[in-house]
Amino acid sequence: MLKLTRWTTAHRRIVVIAWIVLAAGVLFASQAIGKKNANNFSLPNTDSQRAVDLLQSRFPAQAGDADQIVFHTRTGKLTDSSARATIAPMLARIARLPHVAGVVSPYAPGSSAISKAGTIGFATVEFDQAVDKLPKAAINRVITTAETARSSTLQVELGGQAIKQAQQASLGFATGVGLIAAMAVLLLSFGSLLAMGLPIVTALFGLGAGLGVIGLGSHLVDMADFSSELALMIGLGVGIDYALFIVTRYRDAYRENGGDVQSAVELAMNTAGRAILFAGATVVIALLGMFALGVSFIYGAAIAASLGVLLVLAASLTLLPALLMFTGKRVGRTRRSRSARPHEARAGFWLRWVGLIQRRPAWAALASTALLLLLAAPALGLRLGSSDSGNDSTKQTTRRAYDLLATGFGSGFNGPLLLAVRLPAAGDTGGLAKFTTALRHTPGIASVAAPRLNPARDTAAISVYPTTSPQSAQTTSLVKRLRSDVLPSIAKTTGAAVYVGGATATQVDFARVLSGKLPLFIGLVVLISALLLLIVFRSLLIPVQAALMNLLSIAAALGVVQAIFERGWLAGLIGVQPGPIDAFIPVMVFAIVFGLSMDYEVFLVSRIHEEWQHRDDASAAVREGVANTGRVITAAAAVMVAVFISFAAGDDRVLKLFGVAMATAVFLDAIVIRSVLMPAVLELFGRRTWAFPSWADRRLPRLAIEAPATRPELALDEAA
């Protein structure tokens, strides 16, 4: 670390210019080429994937995405000539657009696409590709063409997966709110505009380069539509935090060494810099651990988030020390540094607080654990699924289309099931009648469309409309019942093969696959992280404590999310409707929060370990470690909470889920775990915290994240 720091400080002008060129260059290239979104829901060995594969190979016209254009006449009926004269020509124009395979008009014979009241109807737009492969420009042309039919008497809305993906809202406002909140927290923490600005500038340069690389990488790797937003959310939080840790340590060193900028920068990078390098590596490991799930949908999001973290980490380790060489004297010489020495500043709130914890460690540990378990309790009722467009903002056309379809035809019309049937022989369609008859008599099914045959007449597609919404638990039960009870016996007697597919069935399979692999993923990430902590700190307790406490904070965060988003407690405050938790949320929240929690774990434990090596007094080490890091950890947590909550204030349900879950987890980690539970547990264990078998110490490799000298004054001498 010292070699890297000395090189960056010696070539500080080159480093700053290089970062400006890098960030501007990749952002410009990314904007010029454009970003490619791809929600690839490939789920090998599932019924829904078999349906997709069958239709793609034998019936490609039915394998693409199918979206709806919904009409509502405010006067008269849709069957009136005036309505027909507006709708029919518009649908004809859409049918000629690129990537549109066909359009089923509400006036087509047998379509049953006009409600009984005659005021609501829908046309089905069949695209020639799945939603993850459709160009956004092609979807937007469909949207703009459909909107030309809107008038004071005719409401036109659009719904479906492709429409939803194309209508993703910008996060510019949320990002701005998060930045302003972060600046306010940093200004209160540092009391200096310049010191406040350094973490912001460093994070923005790293984040700008990261978003540019992500945009370019989206052409090489399939990335879900929320990948950049997720990387922005995480990168902004950790980038400011990493820089905050370094600037705080720099200011302490600058005040202690009498104003030597070079030595203070080297000490800050050789202590806090090492800690954030280890913490950042842990975040990336946790994110890339999602590859162990074997679900391609989240690969792109994992890569995007990892790139965001890596670039802001690189900026903190190279750009920040270079900037400190230009501004170090003004950052270090603050009003606070002239009026209070470090030991006087420490004799404040945090010393009194940790003293209170150390006087009653058992009670503190029990109370904090009970609180976390209480918050985690709702997570036992977590129902994984996929929220539908009924949870979108009423400002979005997808939500208005959803409401119109539910009013006119029932909630199930918003998420039809698509049965793919491979016939025993070409033209052998006798069994199709048995399938449709059985489906129409199955409880939970509102209607069944007539089977559609491919040109070779060896494959059929049947649209099935449930009575309940796509996100309903009853719809999930219906899918399972069709697969296990209704369809197998008919398939056996007719010799046909039938698979239940469609977007709703895919989400059911997605939730099942992730739920089955989640324990393996958690175990893998926890094991690797614990092993790294074991090697670094040479302690048996520290890895166990870190794993259990991080799991507690994540479970509590998921409990809060379940209570708000699924049970509907306080849901009105953030504008969400009760529904299932999207299946990938617990996986990604675990990966991200576990990695972020390691930031605080490493920063705090490394300082406690430093004091332990110097004093050989376990209680004093905990006291000094918490007193020296408590303020910066809570300030860093406040920055992250502000950033995450700002994203939760948007209209996108997925980002609301991420924002609330991560803000809750970070808050609990910093306030309950690092400030109460962890010091209480370490106080109870005392010297046994650092017990480690001598044979293991000899055999394990050494990975130091602390300066070779354990005291600041010694480290400064060595750095000089």
Image (cartoon, helix red, strand yellow):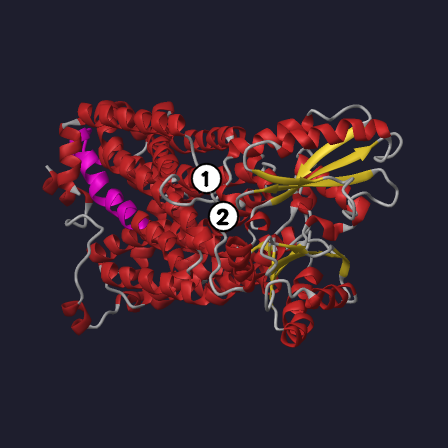
Q: Residue at x 30, y 50 (%)?
A: 281
- Decide if residue 116 is on the left or right side of residue 451: right
| Distance between mark 1 and mark 2 Cα atoms | 10 Å
What amino acid does circle 1 point to? Met
Placement of the C terminus among the 4 image quadrants: top left
At horizontal 66% and vertical 53% (from top left) the residue drawn is 579
Residue beneath label 1, please?
233
Q: Residue 497 at what x, y percent from top left? A: 59, 68
The stretch in magenta equals: 256-279
| Disc 1 versus disc 2: nearer the observer | 1
Query: In this view of the protein, which residue sits in the foreground, 276 or 93?
Result: 93
Q: Is residue 149 above or below residue 479?
A: above
- Residue at position x 52%, y 34% from top? 136
Q: Residue at x 39, y 40 (%)?
A: 218
Question: Does residue 332 lie above or below 478 as drawn?
Answer: above
User: Mark 1 touching mark 2, by CB under 8 A?
Assistant: yes
Let me know if residue 572 is in the magenta part: no
Residue 625 seen anywhere in this rendered image of the structure: no
Under circle 2, the secondary element is helix
Relative to 331, is 235 on the left or the right?
A: right
Q: Give whichever of discs 1 and 2 has the lower sequence position.
A: 1
Instruction: Decide whether the magenta segment is chiefly helix, strand or loop.
Output: helix
The residue under label 2 is 662
Q: Which x, y percent locates residue 393?
A: 66, 38
Q: Describe the element under mark 1 as helix, strand or loop.
A: helix
Quadrant location of residue 540?
Answer: bottom left
- Residue situated in front as seen by the camera: 250 or 680: 250
Neighbour tally class for label 1: few under 14, some 14-19, many 20 plus, Cα within 10 Å = many
